[in-house]
Amino acid sequence: SLTFLNFSTTFAQCVAFLNLGSVYDVAWSPDSQLLASCSNDMVVKIVHVRPPDYDRRPGRNGKYDDERDVDPLPLSFRGHDGTVRTVCFGNGNQVVSGGAGDCHLRVWDPMQQNDGDAPLMVLKGHQSSIFSVKSGASASNTSTVLGPHTIVSGSEDRTVRVWDLRTGSCVSSIGAEGISHWEDGTPAMAKCPVQSLDVCPHSEATVVTGHEDGNCCVWDLKTKRLLWTLQTHDTQCRSVTYSPHGRYILSASFDGTLAISDSDVWERRVVGKLEGHVGKVLRAQWHPTDNIFASCSTDCTVKIWGNM
């Protein structure tokens, strides 16, 4: 059985930067040296984060005034005309952001651009607010659909789109228009907005989406087919993420619960339903290597779950 540890910790080193509105998402760069955030102040911020083993030494005058010891100010990128709901890194250290307003994705390069610069690219295609964007795949993925240069986005318009950041074009899409059907003829489509999504870490072209009606859907981007769907929650599924090895799907909902679903072809069922929060669960995330995870809620708590 899974139990949780509710924690409150003071860190020896804290990097903070101010947004003028609610922060909807944060993301680490692949090398963990950059942290991006987005907000309803319509700004994307990127800050450099020192490594844990950073050794800060005083200059020759005994003061910490060496240029290398100065924390660079966060970069602030503006260009969205509505709330920025989601952000991720892709194609190396490029940053991709999306949200409301004109419902376009924007691409930034914090290694090449300066504070206030316009986006490198604007990716147009979604017809409504973009709620989730994730990196397409690791460098080891040889799929023709997903790769280190792609990102995947999910929207209120009920579609999932794959974008090539080298060209700025949409290379694949699934959703409400022109998609395939189950063998029995049932339309294989997302019947309500895509609230969240994640890319399977050990599959060429599989993504999971969480929806406003509490369903989780698993898609094959190569064939553009809905593989299976599962009613995991009673209401809005705000967060979905694969376990490190890709077998289990962790979902979190406004109904106050978390669910663990087994994606094995012979299972495809909810194997655990977890209660512990007294408010809406906004996000849940697996540990990078272990079968433990953390969740956060409107009840103002973060909980770590695992076998105790």
Image (tube, helix red, strand yellow):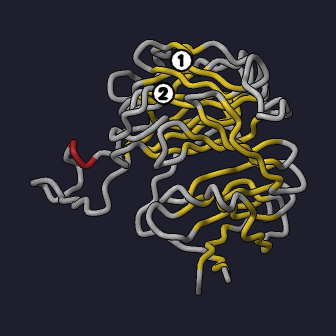
- Which of these two is toward me, 202 or 292? 202
Residue at point 59%, 87% (across, down) = 308
Mark 2 and mark 1 in contact? Answer it, CB < 8 Å: yes
x, y (%) of residue 280?
82, 58
Query: Which residue is situated farthest in the left direction here?
Result: 60
* Residue 22 point in image, percent of width and height: 71, 43
Is 18 situated above or below 40?
below
> Whole-percent x and y of residue 193?
81, 33
Which circle marks residue 252 in the picture? none
* Residue 275, picture quadrant: bottom right
Does dot 2 land on a helix, a strand or a loop? loop
In this view of the protein, which residue sits in the foreground, 286 or 58? 286
Quadrant location of the N terminus in the rendered image: bottom right
Regarding residue 39, the answer to whether it shows in the image is no
| Front residue of 22 and 25 | 25
In the displayed structure, does residue 123 sit left or right of residue 201? right
Residue 10 relative to residue 103: left or right = left
Which residue has dot 2 on it?
A: 145
In the picture provided, is 92 more to the left or to the right than 200? Answer: left
Is there any visible trace of residue 9 in the rendered image?
Answer: yes
Which residue lies at the image location 65% right of the left edge and 44% below the top edge? 208
Label 1 crowd bin: few (<14), some (14–19), many (20+), radius 10 Å: few
Q: Residue at x 57, y 40 (%)?
A: 206
38 left or right of 141 in image: right
Amino acid type at circle 2 is Val
SS category of the residue bearing label 1: strand
Local crowd at mark 2 within 10 Å, few (<14), some, or many (≥20)? some
Q: Which residue corresponds to mark 1?
A: 171
Which residue occupies 41% across, 63% down? 13
Amino acid at the residue labelled 1: Val
Name the foreground residue: 102 vs 218.
Answer: 218
Q: Which comes sooner in the sequence, label 2 or label 1?
A: 2
